[in-house]
Amino acid sequence: MLELWTEAVRSIEPMIKPAHRDLWLRPIECVGIGDGRIRLRAPNRYHKEWFEDNFLPSILKDLEARACQSFTVDFEVSEESVVATSLTPSGSGASFGAMTREVRLPQPAPPPPPAPDLVPRYTFEKFVVGPTNQFAHAAARMVAETPASRWNPLFIYGGVGLGKTHLLHAIGHEVHKQRPEWNITFVTCERFVTDFIGSMMHQKRQGGSSSMEDFRARYRNVPDVLLIDDIQFLSNKDSSQDEFFHTFNALHYAHKQIVLTSDKLPAELPGVEDRLRSRFTWGLIAEVETPDLETRVAILKHKAEVDKVNLPDDVALYLAAHVKTNVRELEGALLRLAARASFQGQSISLELARDALAKLIANTPTGLTIESIQREVAAYFDVKLHDLKGPKRHRAVAHPRMVAMFLARKLTNMSYPEIGSRFGGKDHSTVISAVRKIERLCGEDPTVRSVVGTIESHLRQP
């Protein structure tokens, strides 16, 4: 019967991303099948819950078809135990003096670390989970539950305003709750660079090396968990990249947890050294995508509940259908609507929502020009603008050109021939082919989908 379970598991593996397969499927162990019952073992409750929600129904369906009978499932959760060890003198060579100092003059307990500098509302409980962020949320919870384990570093990437920073703070809050004696350092990458430059300048002015020693102690020795937001800020900053390279190595070697956020995949970060990109992929990479309609509605309802705003369902659906870019804009639209209702002494209605948000909705991407799209795509892929519009056909230019054509078609009112003319006189059939190819790749390849979504998010920002 165990062979039937193995075959049923294999039947769904081709439909699962490799990262999900390694993280959530393979740790589940079948310890026995008999009398219509299946006994499974999970390493912890997060693995159990993820498996039950995402994989178990499909596996059971396949297994029951193979065995021609129905099954019930019993789950065991393995609790991780922590073994404490202590050094005790043994043998005739033990130092009596050392033992006396330990017994009679114990060192005072070190002072507790300061509370982490985290946004109070950015917790796991207040993060709205949907299909587009489910994996990133689960990965963040796993890291918070077992920091500095196999998922180190955790690299969370996605477009602007999709919840990456929220997850970063949530990890810090959860680790602090579970391990209050740990030092949790949250810092933006911009702050890291600013601190580094300031320490170097102070050292040059004052002489000596104390400034840099303090800086390195603060980032390499003190943190048990280092949370860095917007790591893409290291782009083209050679000295800061070198410093962060050594900071990363020191923390990773000491088994301290590192969590990074970025607007791009490691391989897509322009102006970042290969040795850093490589280290960013050592652990687990999780994507946060643009939320779907149902998730956007849930985010609005949750935000309204927190802010004690009476938001009718039809208004929530209207907002979610028209504000699609990111969570930040979605919550901003709700705030604007609630303020208008309060000022006018009215309750929130669909008519009020249409009036209050007319300009906001009218201004979503129609103001974009093809030139702004070309500049954004060229900057993202680190290619020259004239190459993007020129005749070069090698992939380093051809792929960004197709992305730019796709976004131009999606975000402007220009026709295929008009778009082709702005790309060095390309034929309209070339533009049609490019648009269709990127549409297909977005459906098949999560990396391409993420890249296109990130660029589109940037373009939609004011």
Image (spheres, rainbow, N blue to C red):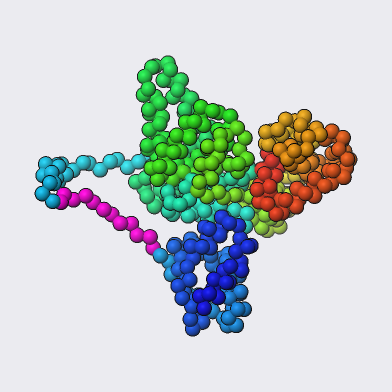
Q: Quadrant for the C terminus, please.
A: top right
Q: Is residue 362 magenta?
A: no
Q: Is residue 236 left or right of residue 247?
A: right
Q: Where is residue 196 in the image (x, y as percent from the top left)?
A: 47, 27
- Residue visible at 39% across and 24% down in the picture: 211
Q: Position of residue 356 (x, y in %)?
A: 72, 45
Q: What stretch is highlighted in magenta?
A: 79-90
- Residue visible at 40% across and 26% down in the picture: 212
Q: In this view, does 441 lie to the left or right of 37?
A: right
Q: Position of residue 116 (x, y in %)?
A: 42, 41
- Residue visible at 58% across and 64% down in the picture: 54
The reply to whether residue 73 is visible in this rendering is yes
Q: In this view, does 3 lie to the left or right of 324?
A: left
Q: Which of 131 and 333 is in front in this view?
A: 131
Q: Is residue 84 above or below residue 254?
A: below
Q: Is residue 262 above or below residue 201?
A: below
- Residue visible at 47% across and 31% down in the picture: 243
Q: Position of residue 254 (x, y in %)?
A: 38, 42
Q: Which of 303 and 234 is in front in this view?
A: 234
Q: Residue furthest front?
A: 394
Mainly helix, strand or loop, the magenta region? loop
* Rendered image quadrant of residue 429: top right
